Amino acid sequence: MRTAPASPGMPGLGTSYARGVGSTGPSKPTLSQRNVCVGVTWPLLAPALTINTVVMLITAFKAYDHIQVITQGGPGSGTTATVAFIILQTGFTANRQGYAAAMAIVMLLVVATASAVALRLLQRREVDL
């Protein structure tokens, strides 16, 4: 699942960039694959990786179903519990819907802030075409 974020951006790259590096790069007869990958491919994949990183960050905060189905909160007192799991347990199991709603608003603010910071930091690394 971690290699999937790069997949959508790959078809748009083409091979013309890699060929261009060979003709305008150092005077060595051949460039190593590493130089083409680091110098050309990764910067061009940055927009796709930025969006996928932010989406994966948001998804990590929302994890509930896998934890409930596999471990029911984990061994002991919620060792695998996430924020979303705790919010839903508070609202439905403990029957404290108002408190769970307040927790959800705080989680929304945290996720929005974390996403905005991640988006800002990752957009700085993108290459303008």
Image: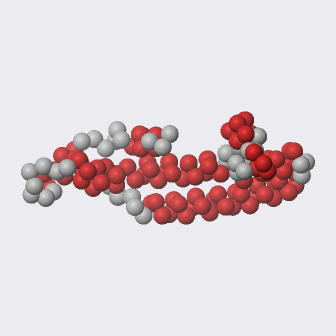
Residue 91 visible, this orientation: yes
Q: Quadrant of the C terminus?
A: bottom left
129 above or below 72? below
Tell me which colouring the rendered structure shows. Answer: secondary structure
The total number of labels drawn is: 0
Residue 40 visible, this orientation: no
Q: Residue at x 24, y 42 (%)?
A: 15
Furthest-front residue in view? Answer: 76
Furthest-right residue in view? Answer: 95
x and y percentages locating residue 115 in the rendered image: 58, 58
Q: Residue at x 24, y 53 (%)?
A: 35
x and y percentages locating residue 121 in the rendered image: 48, 64
x and y percentages locating residue 54 in the rendered image: 54, 53
Q: Residue at x 74, y 44 (%)?
A: 74
Viewer-side residue, 91 vs 19 = 91
Viewer-side residue, 34 vs 78 = 78
Q: In screen coordinates, is 61 left or right of 116?
A: right
x and y percentages locating residue 81 in the rendered image: 72, 49
Q: In screen coordinates, is 22 left or right of 79?
A: left
Q: In screen coordinates, is 113 left or right of 103?
A: left
Q: Residue at x 22, y 44 (%)?
A: 16
